[in-house]
Image (tube, rainbow, N blue to C red):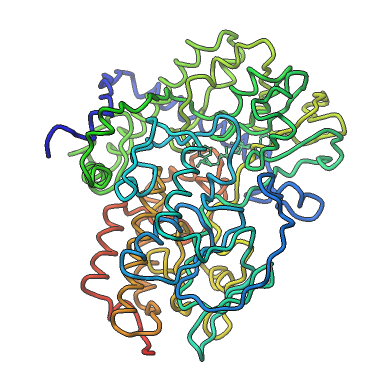
């Protein structure tokens, strides 16, 4: 490789010297972390019970504001080779690989009115990726595309998704504004029967659940929320008709936003400069680090050689080694287990204290600054990167309502209530997140012997690689549990897409009808997941959030594979290259 190198866009970060502090300092901070976590656990209903689905009286919150939902079409009754449930990154990445191995009959069934998934639904002001675009956007080599910025905006990512669908002819068979309601295995025909809410009855040889990891929006369960007389919506269903495209309609509006996760962090600066008054209801602050964003140097963009994104990825994976994440430059080689844990924890705390210092430097009001400080280990919650979020709290119209872990528990017809004070507003924005890694949301999946996949999972999730599950032949799950949860999710989805396309290619070229993982291989993977979970108590020590199942203890197998991305890739490659007949039962046509 010459020096038209992809690294030239990644500005080197200065190495920060480790700070020398007595162990007592770190122990005290850990005590504060524990107290903050316990306070939060004491306030909220257990686990996911604190959230409610957008159903019944709240069903309207889920309506698509970007498309006319009422458009009628004829029901479809036909057969395709591969059906993908969902049209986001998972579907696009996998379809591209399927096209490369010659699969012609591919149908995407998608709830939105276009492809894009997350990037279709999330169009709130300020939306952008916060994983570097050159790594995050899929198929840049294949598309011959270089993103316009280090962190691309949402509309650019959505356009990129559409371009992928056009390049790989995925619009030909796709159906939009359509929800798969049941996916049932026909053991005699050895085909899947898929039914939708549009009356479609489709047969497919292979089904890929590409329904996303954070696809189904949820609302905080707050007493009286149905009584609010003003306007309200969820961040993933932004109502631009109400706010105006440029938010100018908010100039005379008082706005409350509930939640301060990654979505809210990108939205709040835009509300601050547009709305008359902004009330930010915070339960737990996010960690806000510097966002190194810049426009892509067009000379560099023109100079990159084919395969540049793949080389970046390979270099990244190599740098990960075993896949472990080391905080703040701790180098724990040669230490015993306890020393290693301590070194990593102390480095993590140093990183968090740097985040605290930045808050003190930027936020003028000391009380607000104190409230914005996150008291948990970095990576207990998703880290956020933004340069305008903290300064927004210096604006006179922006008010932080720090509920200190308690959260908003009541809303009346005028607005949110906290400690008996009503905050009168015109608009409430729910920045309350999404259901996490649900397989077959909206959809009932029934495999061999009438076994329902979610009922099987009720006894403990059982998969091979988080993708295959015994008794569900030719069914592939993407982005679910028992696979690694990567900060750059695209990387993980690409790995899974390549594996799935490899499996489908194997079945086709060998003249098989179906593949089903053996119970032994499934057990092996469940054991792998269990072996790599809970090496330390860090998960339970964390403040509650979706990263740690809202603080609920769960079965050791009901989570992600923590053995590292590199090991995951190697395990899958080994099975595909050497052990297909050991790992799967095949039937012939
Ligand atoms: P999150 O689940 O991260 O945040 C939900 C927020 O709602 C939390 O701050 C939570 O508080 C708060 N909350 C819940 N109930 C209440 C209540 N009763 N009162 C007050 N606050 C409450 O959702 P997001 O939509 O922000 O983010 C979801 C994920 O989407 C991100 O973590 C990220 O993976 C992805 N994302 C990625 C982006 C990107 O790449 N640029 C941008 C946006 C999102 P608490 O923390 O106490 O639970």
> Left of 461 or right of it: where is 465?
left
- Residue 222 position (above or below residue 190): above
The residue that appears at 46% across and 45% down in the rendered structure is 539
Residue 426, given in percent of the width and then of the height, sits at 80, 27
What is the residue that sits farthest to the top in this orientation?
A: 364
Name the quadrant where ligand 1 sits. top right
> Left of 189 or right of it: where is 531?
left
- Quadrant of res 407: top right
What is the residue that sits farthest to the left in this orientation?
A: 2
Residue 456, given in percent of the width and then of the height, sits at 54, 73
The residue that appears at 36% across and 73% down in the rendered structure is 504
Residue 367, given in percent of the width and then of the height, sits at 61, 13
- Residue 270 position (above or below residue 86): above
Front position in the image: 438 or 143: 143
Pick the quarter of the image with the C terminus: bottom left
- Quadrant of res 529: bottom left
Disc count in the image?
0
Pick the quarter of the image with the N terminus: top left
Front position in the image: 91 or 36: 91
Front position in the image: 271 or 527: 271
The residue that appears at 47% across and 80% down in the rendered structure is 471
Residue 354, given in percent of the width and then of the height, sits at 40, 20
- Residue 442 position (above or below residue 288): below
- Residue 371 position (above or below residue 480): above
């Amino acid at each position: 490789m010459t020096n038209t190198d992809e690294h030239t866009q990644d500005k080197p970060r200065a190495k920060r010297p480790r700070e020398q502090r007595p162990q007592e300092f770190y122990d005290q901070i850990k005590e504060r972390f524990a107290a903050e976590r316990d306070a939060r656990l004491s306030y909220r209903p257990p686990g996911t019970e604190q959230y409610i689905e957008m159903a019944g009286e709240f069903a309207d919150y889920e309506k698509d504001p970007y498309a006319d939902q009422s458009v009628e079409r004829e029901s479809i009754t036909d057969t395709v080779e591969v059906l993908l449930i969902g049209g986001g990154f998972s579907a696009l990445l996998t379809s591209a690989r399927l096209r490369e191995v010659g699969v012609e009959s591919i149908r995407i069934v998608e709830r939105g009115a276009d492809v894009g998934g997350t990037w279709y639904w999330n169009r709130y002001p300020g939306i952008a990726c916060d994983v570097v675009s050159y790594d995050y956007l899929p198929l840049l080599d294949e598309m011959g595309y270089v993103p316009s910025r280090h962190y691309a905006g949402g509309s650019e990512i959505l356009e990129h998704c559409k371009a992928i669908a056009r390049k790989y002819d995925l619009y030909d068979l796709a159906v939009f504004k359509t929800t798969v309601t049941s996916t049932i295995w026909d053991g005699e025909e050895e085909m899947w029967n898929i039914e939708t809410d549009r009356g479609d009855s489709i047969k497919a040889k292979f089904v890929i659940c590409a329904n996303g990891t954070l696809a189904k929006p949820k609302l905080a369960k707050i007493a009286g929320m149905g009584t609010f007389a003003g306007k309200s919506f969820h961040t993933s269903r932004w109502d631009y008709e109400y706010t105006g495209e440029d938010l100018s309609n908010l100039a005379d509006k008082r706005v409350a936003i509930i939640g301060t996760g990654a979505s809210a962090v990108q939205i709040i600066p835009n509300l601050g400069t547009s709305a008359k008054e902004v009330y930010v209801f915070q339960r737990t602050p996010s960690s806000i680090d510097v966002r190194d964003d810049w426009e892509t140097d067009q000379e560099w963009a023109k100079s990159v050689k084919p395969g540049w994104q793949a080389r970046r990825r390979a270099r990244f994976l190599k740098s990960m080694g075993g896949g472990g994440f080391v905080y703040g430059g701790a180098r724990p080689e040669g230490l015993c287990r306890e020393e290693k844990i301590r070194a990593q924890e102390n480095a993590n705390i140093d990183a968090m204290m740097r985040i605290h210092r930045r808050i003190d430097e930027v936020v003028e009001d000391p009380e607000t600054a104190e409230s914005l400080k996150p008291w948990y280990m970095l990576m207990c919650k998703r880290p956020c990167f933004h340069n305008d979020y903290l300064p927004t709290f210096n604006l006179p119209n922006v008010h932080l309502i720090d509920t200190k872990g308690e959260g908003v528990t009541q809303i009346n017809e005028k607005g949110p209530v906290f400690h008996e004070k009503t905050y009168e507003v015109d608009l409430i924005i729910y920045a309350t997140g999404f259901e996490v890694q649900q397989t077959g949301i909206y959809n009932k999946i029934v495999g061999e012997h009438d076994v329902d996949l979610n009922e099987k999972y009720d006894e403990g999730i059982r998969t091979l690689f988080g993708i295959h599950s015994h008794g569900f032949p030719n069914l592939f799950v993407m982005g679910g549990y028992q696979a690694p949860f990567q900060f750059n999710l695209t990387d993980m989805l690409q790995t899974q897409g390549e594996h799935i396309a490899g499996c489908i290619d194997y079945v086709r070229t060998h003249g098989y009808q179906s593949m089903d993982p053996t119970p032994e291989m499934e057990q092996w993977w469940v054991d792998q997941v269990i072996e790599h979970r809970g090496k330390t108590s860090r998960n339970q020590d964390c403040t509650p959030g979706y990263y740690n199942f809202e603080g609920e203890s769960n079965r050791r197998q009901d989570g992600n594979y923590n053995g590292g991305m590199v090991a995951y890739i190697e395990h899958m490659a080994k099975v595909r290259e050497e052990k297909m007949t050991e790992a799967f039962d095949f039937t012939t046509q």
